[in-house]
Amino acid sequence: MWVYEKKLQYPVNIKKTDARAAKIIISQYGGPDGEAGASFRYLSQRYSMPDKIVAGVLTDIGTEELAHLEIIGAMVHQLTRDLTPEEIEKSGFAPYYVDHTLGVWPQAAGGVPFNASEFQVKGDPICDLVEDMAAEQKARVVYDNLLRLLDDPDVVEPLKFLRAREIVHFQRFGESLNRTQDKLDHSNVYAFNPAFRG
Amino acid sequence: MNQAVTRQSLLRQIMEYDFAIYDLALYLDTHPEDSASLELFQQLKKQSERYTEEYARLFGPLTFKQVNSDNYWTWISDSWPWEGGCE
């Protein structure tokens, strides 16, 4: 089970309102490569992961992704909490505002709602771990893209931290994949699903 | 604590205490000045901490901060709760 800790994994203290920044950063809340999808992906893949070390990696990274979801939520909140009606109009935030006011709702930058179709749980350890490595790369690219568009240090620093974590996770999933491949049955040269005795 | 205590029975006790604590926490969220509940919270917390420390010492960590080995990362040593290892 989980216990909430009343702190962020990395501090977020944004002083300048910026709806334009919030509109693109929110993609890491509920977008196709966002933190919500990452957490659900890893925490759901654990059940069919036969290697208990790899199951531990999924548990610990899936838990950290929830902390990252909270960092992104805090950023979107702080970027929008002082918006005036004039700024909402001017920044193009009105379509979001009309449905969610200044609440934080999981959607992609383009407005597409969060959807479980953004990730897979295939029940095949090799397949799932390869997806996880790709997912970390995709999330890293989103942070790279955001960092090219943003320059407020209060916004950039947490994003740089989150970007670095994607790289660490990619490394750990790579090690998990190697470990899983090393443990395949000697005759299983085609890497058939080691989690299903069909 | 009696050394004959089994892993399952100790874990069950921790689960019961921690559920009681959680339920009480929800009540206290909306009744933050209820002194009887605050007193009960402290009692349950003390007992839960005692059992949790005992469990970590005898059987292994429930959170990774409880790992106290300097030669192996015991966090990944035992089965995970969804495998039925914790009940």
Image (cartoon, rainbow, N blue to C red):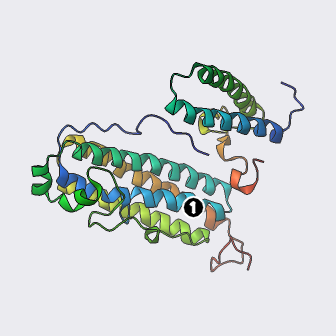
Which of the two residues, A94 or B49, is positioned nearer the viewer here? A94
Q: What residue is disc 1 on?
A: A44
What is the quadrant of the C terminus of chain A in the image? bottom right
Residue B1 pos. (x, y %): 83, 24
Give the residue displayed 28% in from the left and 48% down from the top. Answer: A76
Find numbered disc 1 in the image and state the secondary structure of the residue it sits on.
Answer: helix
Q: Chain of mark 1?
A: A
Is A173 positioned to the left or the right of A34 in the image?
Answer: right
Is B72 positioned to the left or the right of A143 in the image?
Answer: right
Q: Quadrant of residue B59?
A: top right
Is B17 positioned to the left or the right of A116 in the image?
Answer: right
Could you tell me if residue A87 is visible in this image? yes
Please determine whether, in this image, residue A94 is positioned above or below residue A12: below
Amino acid type, callout 1: Ser
Residue B80 pos. (x, y %): 69, 51
Is B7 positioned to the left or the right of A6 in the image?
Answer: right
Q: Residue furthest right?
A: B4
Give the residue displayed 17% in from the left and 44% down from the top. Answer: A17
Residue B73 pos. (x, y %): 64, 41
Please determine whether, in this image, residue A106 is positioned above or below residue A112: above
Mark 1: few/some/many CA within 10 Å (<14, 14-19, 20+): some
Give the residue displayed 31% in from the left and 50% down from the top. Answer: A103
Which of the two residues, A151 or A20, is positioned nearer the viewer here? A20
Q: Quadrant of residue A43?
A: bottom right
